[in-house]
Amino acid sequence: MKAIKLALILVFFCVSKLIMAQTKEDLKKQKVKIESEINYTTDLLNKTKSNKTKSLSYLKVLEAQLRNKEGFLIALNIELSLLNKKIKKNKDSITKVEEEIKEEEETLRKLKDEYTKMIYAAFKKKGNRNNLMFVFSADDFNQAYKRMLYLKQYSVFRKSQAIKIEKSKAELVGKKKKLAQQKDSLTEELAIKKLLVGSKKQELESINNHKKDKKELIKKLSKSEKLFKKQLKDKQKKARELEEKIREIIKEEIAKSREKNSNYNLTPEALALSSEFMNNKGKLPWPLEKGIIVGRYGTQKHVVFSGVETFNNGVDIATDKNADVRVVFDGTVSRIFFIKGEGKAVLINHGEYFSVYSGLKEVGVKTGEKLLSKEKIGVVITHKEEDKTELHFEIWKGYDKQNPSNWLYNAY
């Protein structure tokens, strides 16, 4: 249990670090993507709800929903953390501006007092004598010149004081305006925070409900251990059959190329296609317009029996009934074959790369046909007994299996 908790903390830390490194705009996009996936998985869950007590597919979609909701909660927490920092910064800035306004008001008061005293003193002196008499009453020319300079400087000083007062007034108005804007911004930020806190509470409640649902469902499904282990055995057998057929077809494709070239060098066309395919790693379109990955590549623990492990050669994508399957890149149809109980499968050649689409009820292409990216190749099958509509998708490079999630756009 401690190991699981530690792993969860590490995952949370890594995801948090990743999202923190993003910009606010990136975080917004991440949230929109997760929200979109949550809405889609909710739709899929509603469609299979009536059959959930006997359906592993419902449980797999529920797990995907939980992953998305936990990811969304992490994004919410980080957004709240960033917003709290922004609110604190804004509050500190408001305090600073308020202090500056107080200082500015005190400076303005002092300037006005000084100016008032100056005007009053000038008025009193003027009552006794005018400036001209003040200059002419000098004892000598030098004294008269100094008195003229004094009067001139005094006049300039009065004007500068008046300018300082106006400038101080303008600065005060500007700071008060800035303060009002910052207070409006703070009010807006606090309102957003309130909404985010509300969303966080809703998500936590939703996660807890989903976990409860998952726990109850696992408890019910675990009673059918024999049935599920038989199904798992059948599935593994079908997976091996699919892998053998893929290897056989790839072997034939390589043999064909060797007939043309003993060194098995790809033709210039195939080489260019392989290069383009490689350059689009992480950018390939999904083989379905809508879907959620419910079975990831590699070693996976069984959703009900944690002690049982399976290996997935590709990814399983849950989708809507009668969903169209489309090719992820330009290529040529190498083979169309059938896997008993799993429907039809199509293998497409992309130079030294191959893409595999398994679990089709209809195929609308022919062997040898050249296809363009996103072109329709068939329709996904729905297994009525499980109420499952899933496409199994694989990518191979020669005889080496690839993780499709690394190739498809935004698959993680």
Image: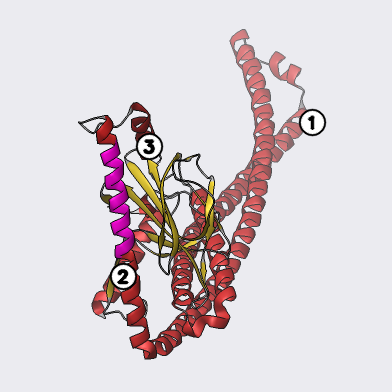
Type of amino acid under label 3: Asn
Please tell me whether residue 261 is drawn above or below residue 133 in the rendered image: below
**How many neighbours does mark 3 have within 10 angstroms: few (below 14), some (14-19), or many (20 or more)?**
few
The N terminus appears in which quarter of the rendering? bottom left
Dominant secondary structure, magenta: helix
Q: Earlier in the sequence, mark 1 or mark 3?
A: 1
Write down the residue under mark 2. Answer: 236
Q: How many marks?
A: 3
In the current view of this chain or complex, which residue is farthest to the top? Answer: 141
Q: Residue at x 49, y 50 (%)?
A: 26
Give the quadrant of residue 272: top left
- Percent x, y of residue 350: 38, 40
> How many C-alpha atoms fall within 10 Å of the one at disc 1: few (<14), some, or many (≥20)?
few
Which mark, residue 127?
1
Residue 104 part of the magenta segment: no
Image location of residue 264, percent across then percent down: 23, 34
Local SS, label 3: helix
Badge 1 marks a residue whose secondary structure is helix
Of callouts 2 and 3, which one flags the residue occurring earlier in the amino acid sequence? 2
Residue 285 can be seen in this image? yes
Describe residue 408's horizontal placement relative to residue 157 as left or right: left
CA neighbours of label 2 inside 10 A, class few (<14), some (14 to 19), many (20+): some
Q: Which residues are magenta?
A: 240-256
